[in-house]
Image (cartoon, rainbow, N blue to C red):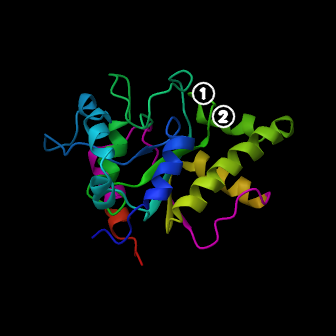
Amino acid sequence: MNKRQISEATYKTLQTKYAKYGSWALWQQPTTAKGLRKAECGIDSFTPQLASATFRQAHLTNAGIVVALNWAGRGPYGDTAWVNFHDTRSTSQDYKVAQMLVGTPFEGSYMTDAIKNFPETNGATALKTIKQPENAAQLATNAAMLQNEIDLIQPQYLIIFGHAAEDLVNFMQARQLLQLNQTQCVEIDHYAASLSYETMAANAERLRQLPLV
């Protein structure tokens, strides 16, 4: 039995409220020595399996929540469930997410953005914008959504992609918009950066070494 499984009530709530924003760290196993090809990184192959409670209990984990900054430049959110972090376009860098999470204790974790409904390719711009005083309401709304996701899952770790997302999580905490309690933050390289396979492997190994209770 997966002792860190996502409860059925938690999964159903996430599906109802956040499926168009979030996803699960599930990918096909690598087919080459250097990992997944971009075309293999979609969520489609797992959609039928996610409909099964037995599959969810075996493969989804609350060990961590994987957090990126924002939706980036793919246009507005659609209605398709769980597609975030599974972009199969030739220009996508999402395959690097799989490279760093497959084979770690955080494979099967819930994944989300700290800023939802904010399509912006430049992370520095997204971070600067959301921190402006005139966007305080939007910041509070996004912090409340992230807080709800954390409260539902109660992860041991937030696995944070990149300095900008880490900065925003710290900013939310400093303004008492986000309470992590016992959840620990671990920042790893952002998947949109120019990363060698060796660097991605080092990130994966770091995640494998994190102690779990």
Image-based side of 59 in relation to 109, left or right: left
**Residue at point 51%, 24% (across, down):** 78
- Measuring 72% from the left and 60% from the top, which residue is drawn there? 173
Q: Position of residue 139 (x, y in %)?
A: 75, 43
The residue labelled by disc 1 is 120
Cβ atoms under marks 1 and 2 closer than 8 Å = yes
Give the farthest residue toward the right: 134
| Residue count near mark 2 (Cα–Cα under 10 Å), binned few <14, some 14–19, many ≥20 | many
Question: What is the quadrant of residue 97 in the picture?
Answer: top left
Element type at mark 2: helix
Q: Position of residue 101 (x, y in %)?
A: 34, 52
| Mark 1: secondary structure | loop
- Residue 126: numbered disc: 2
Q: In this rendering, does residue 8 appear at all?
A: yes
Q: Split into 4 quadrants, where in the image is the C terminus?
A: bottom left
* Magenta-colored stretch includes residue 13: no
Q: Quadrant of the N terminus?
A: bottom left
Mark 1: amino acid: Glu
Residue at the image point whose x is 63% and y is 54% from the top: 148
The amino acid beneath tag 2 is Ala
Q: Of residues 7 and 206, which is closer to you in this image? A: 7
Q: Position of residue 134 (x, y in %)?
A: 86, 35
Q: Residue furthest bottom?
A: 213
Q: Which residues are magenta?
A: 175-204
